[in-house]
Image (cartoon, helix red, strand yellow):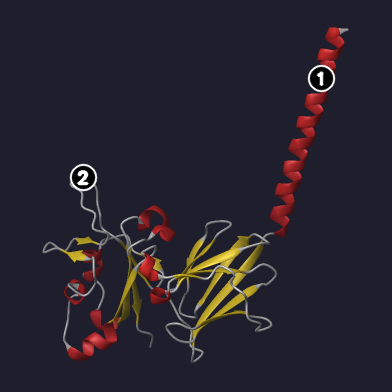
Amino acid sequence: MNKIRFFAMLLLLGVLASGATAQRRAKAQDESAQSRDFSVRIINRRGRPVASVVMQSLSTGEVGITGDDGRYLFSAIAPKEDIRLFLDERGEMVVPVEGIDSLLVVLRSNQQVEYLDAATKQQIELGYGTIPVVDNLRPANELDVVEVLRTGSYTSLLELMRGRFAGVEIKRDGSVIVRGNNSLFTSVEPLVVIDGVGQMGTLADVDGYINVQDIQKITVLKDGSMYGSRGANGVIIITTRKP
């Protein structure tokens, strides 16, 4: 009799385990079916697109950056989704986008930002608030290169940047330290991104092929974790002038 009970319990556990596995598979398939593409567009108060804005899907971890048209398209995000935006001096914002297909962000001023359902133009309630840059969670420095070139002449990117960013050290050999880290054994060079495209070389390498006169602005992210391991030593984002 004990053997019969033992085998009955094993059979029951097998049925339960099989049912749980089937439920997990069904849930995964349901979530996959419900995943969706999601578009983000960022413009300034004059309606012009804003390029080189970094953002991240909190459900999938996908990181993107707006192009020349101010847009980025996420693929296969969750139905209930939050998008994290890093808006330079405005800080980091987390925007809930459940129930909408596209987000329109309007940068009215340094302090005023509107988040709208792109289809209905209805304003989105954040609920999370702002994480200010002064909290040093994602500190950033930005340099208006066009303005700098009006008051001086520069032919080198390293020369242009030297001494203009707090916490950024540019050594005589052209190596760059963004986060204050120093190592004898591993590289501490930051990732360089030009118009949304990560560069394989160092800032000194980039200095060899970019024309300073073509640069609109330079932004330094001391915490480049949104770019994964490549941003561990910080990120230098270069936005070029548009014709």
Q: Amino acid at mark 1?
A: Met
Seen at 18% across and 47% down, the residue is 184
Quadrant in which the N terminus is drawn:
top right
Seen at 25% across and 54% down, the residue is 188
The furthest residue to the left: 172
- Of circles 2 and 1, which is in front? 1
Compared with residue 151, is residue 133 higher up or lower down, i.e. above or below?
above
Say whether residue 58 is left or right of residue 26.
Answer: left
Tag shown at residue 9: 1
Q: Amino acid at mark 2?
A: Phe
Give how far across and how far down residue 111 sits, in percent: 45, 82
Residue sitting nearer the eye, 37 or 7: 7
Seen at 62% across and 63% down, the residue is 81
Say whether residue 100 is left or right of residue 11.
Answer: left
Q: Which residue is mark 2?
A: 185
Residue sitting nearer the eye, 45 or 49: 45
Give how far across and how far down residue 95 sits, in percent: 57, 70
Residue sitting nearer the eye, 36 or 114: 114
Marks 2/1: CA–CA distance: 59 Å
